[in-house]
Image (cartoon, rainbow, N blue to C red):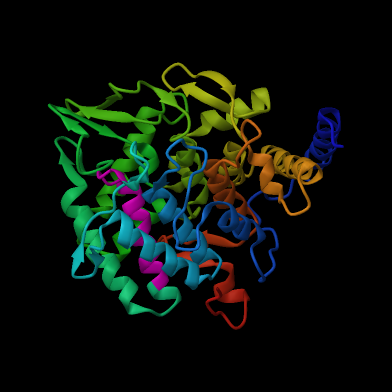
Amino acid sequence: MWSAADAGSALAVVLTLALTAPAADARAAQPANCGDWTAYRQFLARFVQQDGRVVDYSTAVQQTTSEGQSYAMFFALVANDRTTFDRLLGWTRSNLSAGRFDSADVQLPAWQWGRKPDGSYGVLDPNSASDSDLWIAYDLFEAARLWHEPSYSKLAWALVTQIEKQEVATLAGLGPMLLPGPHGFQTGGTTRLNPSYLPLPLLRALAAQAPSGPWASIAANAYTLVKTTAPRGFAPDWAAWRDGRFVVDPKNGDIGSYDAIRVYLWAGLTDASDPLAKAWLDALGGMREQIAKTGVPPERVMTTSGVAQGEAPLGFWGALLPYLRAFNDARAANLAQAHLAALGASAASTAPSDATSSDAFVRGGNQPVYYDEVLMLFGTGAADGRYRFDATGRLQPRWETLCSPAHARS
């Protein structure tokens, strides 16, 4: 039986080993086998149905979000798993877009699907989420290139056309900006925005695909958003544009937490040669300073004052790993990896023989938490060298160059 004391001792040992290790370049990719991606397979087993639906079991309605579908499609690309990619795409087409998700007719996917009050399942909120739409378009463009399948690219173009028509607005005094969705984010003179919806590598990739589109300008404006709304180096979950300037979000205030954690993740994943990479990262230095001070990332921060509250869940460590490595902060990156390794060992010791280390990511001792594992896959996948983004935003999966022959695996 693995006790809490045992877990604490294991964590202490791993932390000691990690923090006394040589401070090599924290961005140096760690070797990864060209074989199966175990963490990805665990994610599929826990959250993805055979029909291609990603289920968040931690929610009462057993929801599926367009976000979940888009992230899983990205992971399938990184894993060279075209069979799962097509299942995910097919389920999204049938259930979130009512069958209207083809190059000749695209309906933006509904963001939320799940169990209705009468017990049936279906769309719970038909509004779309622009970050998910952005990720799906990116996934399709990269799938077309990596798997040499032009039909993906045709669908991506059709989707980008709808994103530009329905989810991009020109804000007076700023220029083009990606709205969080088509409906409900512009009221009077106030436009609400979500900084985590704007990953710089994806904006670069769309700018390369569509140089006459708004994407290069959106990237520049997204940097202005992040820099302006993080006066103490912490990103907020939400912000707003009003009277020609960025202001605190009128609905959620200046809290930075579960949405904002992705802002650090995307900054850490941006190629260092991108012209905005260093400035973007430097604008977010408050999180690194907080970890240096307390040894843990906070669950939430009041971004205008810098006051931090609570200890973040494990997934935050996964999201922050690329960010800390981008700073070449070997000590903090090793600290993140030590937490992940020790908690994985704890879970393996307490779990049944057929369970996996992902059981460490359970809140309340019931189900693994979808969002934690997503952040973990993004962060540890990059840290293990399974993928990276180049300066133009193109995906460079490990299998493309180091696994011979490169082929789609089911």
Tell me if 4 is positioned left or right of 203 in this view.
Answer: right
Residue 162, picture quadrant: bottom left
x, y percent for residue 406: 56, 79
**Between residues 291 and 299, which one lies in front from this camera angle?**
299
Tell me if 323 is positioned left or right of 96 in this view.
Answer: right
Tell me if 224 is positioned left or right of 74 in this view.
Answer: left
Residue 297, picture quadrant: top right
Image quadrant in which the N terminus is located = top right
Residue 275 visible to the viewer: no
Q: Residue furthest front?
A: 118
x, y percent for residue 184: 20, 35
Name which residue lies at 52% across and 70% down.
81
x, y percent for residue 234: 47, 28
Q: Is residue 119 above or below residue 132?
A: above
x, y percent for residue 397: 54, 67
Name which residue lies at 83% across and 33% down.
12
**Between residues 115 and 215, which one lies in front from this camera angle?**
115
Magenta region: which residues? 123-143
